[in-house]
């Protein structure tokens, strides 16, 4: 019922199992979230595959030198049943700066750091560390 949570759990399970790739159904929102995760180093690459109704996104998982995944945890904040909105003053660092907060703002999908720079708030989607 929650496509963003399904995508995050799919990525986390692939990383925990040591798989090189995770496949998720395509949507513009998931693609923009995946591009943010690539920019922050949690994913190596994002590739859109398929045609017409059978599109999907191929996500390459990032691992450290000792074969441990860079992604260790995910926490969904806003759900379809309970929306959570953060103002500009509510956006705080996750895990003392070691994590990442992803927000859906009027300026698009942004990280918490970028949202503070732009002085915007929005719907808090998830935390990742």
Image (spheres, rainbow, N blue to C red):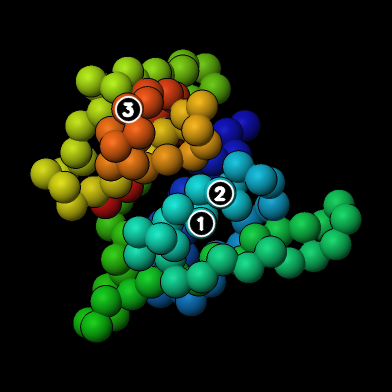
The residue wearing badge 3 is 119
Within 10 Å of the Cα at label 3, are there few (<14), some (14-19), or many (20+) other Cα atoms?
A: few
Residue at the farthest right position: 52
Within 10 Å of the Cα at label 2, are there few (<14), some (14-19), or many (20+) other Cα atoms?
A: some
Within 10 Å of the Cα at label 1, are there few (<14), some (14-19), or many (20+) other Cα atoms?
A: many
Query: Quarter of the image containing the N terminus?
Result: top right
Q: Measured from the top left, where is residue 86 in percent x and y?
A: 34, 20
Q: What separation in Å lies between label 1 and label 2 (alpha carbons)?
A: 5 Å
Q: From this view, report whether residue 19 is shown above or below residue 127.
A: below
Q: Is residue 10 something one can see in this rendering?
A: no
Mark seen at residue 35: 1
> Do the residues under discs 1 and 2 have CB atoms within 8 angstroms?
yes
Tell me: 41 left or right of 46. Answer: left
Q: Nearer the viewer, residue 84 or 2?
A: 84
The mark that comes first in sequence, 3 or 1, is: 1
The residue wearing badge 2 is 32
* Closer mark to the observer between disc 3 and disc 1: 3
The mark that comes first in sequence, 2 or 3, is: 2
């Amino acid at each position: 019922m929650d496509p963003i949570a399904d995508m995050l759990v799919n990525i986390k399970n692939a990383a925990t199992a040591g798989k090189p790739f995770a496949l998720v159904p395509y949507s513009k929102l998931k693609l923009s979230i995946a591009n943010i995760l690539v920019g922050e180093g949690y994913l190596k690459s994002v590739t859109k595959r398929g045609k017409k109704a059978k599109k999907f996104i191929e996500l390459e998982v990032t691992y450290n030198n000792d074969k441990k995944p860079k992604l260790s945890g995910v926490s969904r904040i806003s759900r379809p049943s309970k929306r959570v909105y953060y103002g500009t003053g509510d956006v705080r660092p996750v895990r003392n700066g070691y994590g990442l907060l992803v927000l859906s703002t009027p300026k698009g999908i942004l990280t918490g750091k970028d949202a503070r720079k732009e002085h915007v708030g929005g719907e808090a989607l998830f935390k990742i560390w």
